[in-house]
Image (tube, rainbow, N blue to C red):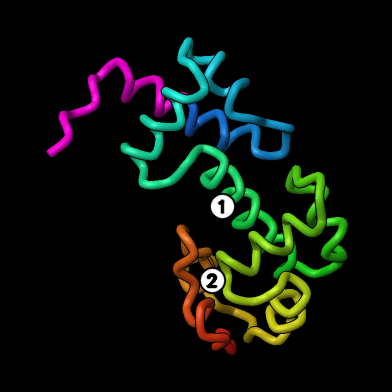
Amino acid sequence: MSRPIPLEDLVRLRRVRDRIDREYRQPLDVPALAAGVALSAGHLSRLFRRAYGESPYSYLMTRRVERAMSLLRGGGMSVTEVCFEVGSSSLGTFSTRFTELVGMPPSVYRERAGRDPDGLPTCVVRHVTRPVRNREAPGAADGLRFNP
């Protein structure tokens, strides 16, 4: 059984999460995040994974995908525009991560999101369409895909 994370480290981790949530569009990396809370990159990564179940990079990419989903549902932007708008610098990496979390490529998501019925409360849309962390997207392993 692992020992509890000290309160001062939990405060640091929360600051890192808050920074990622606030600055997800910026070119953030683990060494810069760690320097901001006076930890080494390795120690931050270990603590973050222990506290939140995923690496800081994975959390950042999840934030970017969540924002991308919202932009794609809104229409009017191409997948490439959305990719760069949310802070990703590589369309390939963005598309791969989006597919892992959502269960379909961003282009397919954009097409299907345009067919969703109007009038659904935003909270319902967010809950139903939220990305799933840690490669747990439904059917991701067996080729099945979500069909709205």
Q: Are marks 2 and 1 in contact (CB under 8 Å)?
A: no
Q: Dot 1 corresponds to which residue?
A: 62
| 136 vs 120, nearest the viewer | 136
User: Which structural element holds mark 2?
Assistant: helix
Residue at 12% from the left image edge and 39% from the top image edge: 1
Q: Amino acid at mark 1?
A: Thr
- Between disc 2 and disc 1, the foreground one is 1
Distance CA(mark 2)–CA(mark 1): 13 Å
The image quadrant of residue 78 is bottom right
The image quadrant of residue 47 is top left
Q: Amino acid at mark 2?
A: Thr
Measured as percent of width and height from the top left, residue 115 is found at: 71, 87
Disc 2 packing (10 Å; few <14; some 14–19; many ≥20):
some
Residue at 72% from the left image edge and 39% from the top image edge: 25
Residue interval drawn in magenta: 1-15
Quarter of the image that includes the C terminus: bottom right
Q: Dot 2 corresponds to which residue?
A: 129
Residue at 70% from the left image edge and 73% from the top image edge: 105
Overall secondary structure of the magenta stretch?
A: helix
| Residue farthest toward the top in the current orientation of the protein | 38
Residue 29 vertical position relative to residue 142 in the rendered view, above or below: above
Disc 1 packing (10 Å; few <14; some 14–19; many ≥20):
many
Q: Is residue 12 left or right of residue 94?
A: left
Measured as percent of width and height from the top left, residue 144 is found at: 55, 88
Sequence-first tag of 2 and 1: 1
**Magenta includes 70?**
no
**Magenta includes 11?**
yes
Residue 21 vertical position relative to residue 61 in the rendered view, above or below: above
